[in-house]
Image: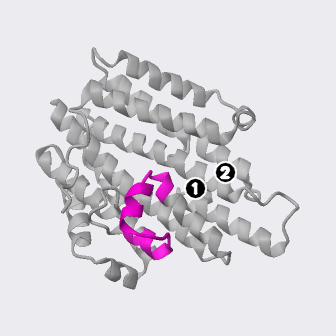
Amino acid sequence: MLSRTADHLYWMARYSERAENLARLLDVTYQMSLVPHDAETERSNWNAIIALNSLQFAYAKRHDEVTATKVLHFMVRDETQPSSIYNCLRAARENARAVRGTLTAEMWETINETWLQLRDQSFDAICLGGIAAFFDWVKQRASLLRGAMFGTMLRDEAFQFIHLGALLERADNTARILDVKYHSLAGVQHGEADDLGEASDFYHWGALLRSVSAFEVYRKVYRDVITPERVAELLILREDLPRALHSCMEGIVRILGKVRNSRSDETVRRAGQLYAALRYARMDDIFARGLHAWLDDFIDAIGDLSARISDDFLVGGEPGEPTLP
């Protein structure tokens, strides 16, 4: 496969996954904002969205204060902001258009229709229809694309690079959302909250689990109250949960083994090393070291792996990135 073709397929998947992950993150923050709390906590929660995506400087250039409405507009529909859902879906479609002949008809129609439906919607129109409903729509469109890919594509190199891009983006996002939300929610210790506080705590952790489609899974696996430690364990070490770090790394290692070339030995080795660290990890050891430090190192390792994959297989950079007005 030509490296440019692989490049477009890989970034098509990453942009699509990025839009879905951003919708999930914004949705959980929005749901949490519905629970009564003070203004400083509200501002901190929305500011975390900006910091999570390293957009503090870009946001400060556009807005003089952090509010729910301004952050939502900035992250959902701002056409000048490359990481907004609008521009991620635009970039996914542009990358798909560049390799239209490599995709199945069902995949192209799903990506193209998603962009056409979003293109003419203003932020006011999105809010009028319900911002939570919009986030559900983004997640549903991403699920349709995944279904079309797994249901119609030949398991060739094109499929592998699409899946690889999605898994890398997903692993990075799961680590980031767990890092930010774990530390903002873990303040209520067992036995220290009244009934109202416990109900609010349960609501917040439930919203976090729903943001990664893991609420029902948690109840099935643990059959008990939701605790911060078990949420972290579920999202890090479960190999059978699609959005868990262990599951993502297992898929990445498997795909790299299929597409490896003469330049990729070190990339394959580092991916295997990261996978082995997850496969044989224990939560006690992770917490003893510090969850934040452990997740920071994981995010850095995923970034290094992404750069190496780009050097070994792809053209480099992020092609198809929308041209901003």
- Compare residues 82 and 158 and report the one nearer the observer: 82
**Left or right of residue 61, residue 154 in this image:** left
Q: Is residue 52 magenta?
A: yes
Residue 309 sits in quarter? top left
The span shown in magenta is 50-73
Q: Quadrant of the N terminus?
A: top left
The local crowd at label 2, few if under 14, some if 14 to 19, many if 20 or more residues have their Cα within 10 Å, is many
Label at residue 214: 1
* Percent coordinates x, y for residue 259 in the rendering: 30, 25
| Relative to 316, residue 74 above or below | below
Label at residue 3: none
What amino acid is at disc 2?
Answer: Val
What amino acid is at disc 1?
Answer: Ala
The residue that label 2 is drawn on is 231
* Percent coordinates x, y for residue 238 in the rendering: 60, 41
Under tag 2, what secondary structure? helix
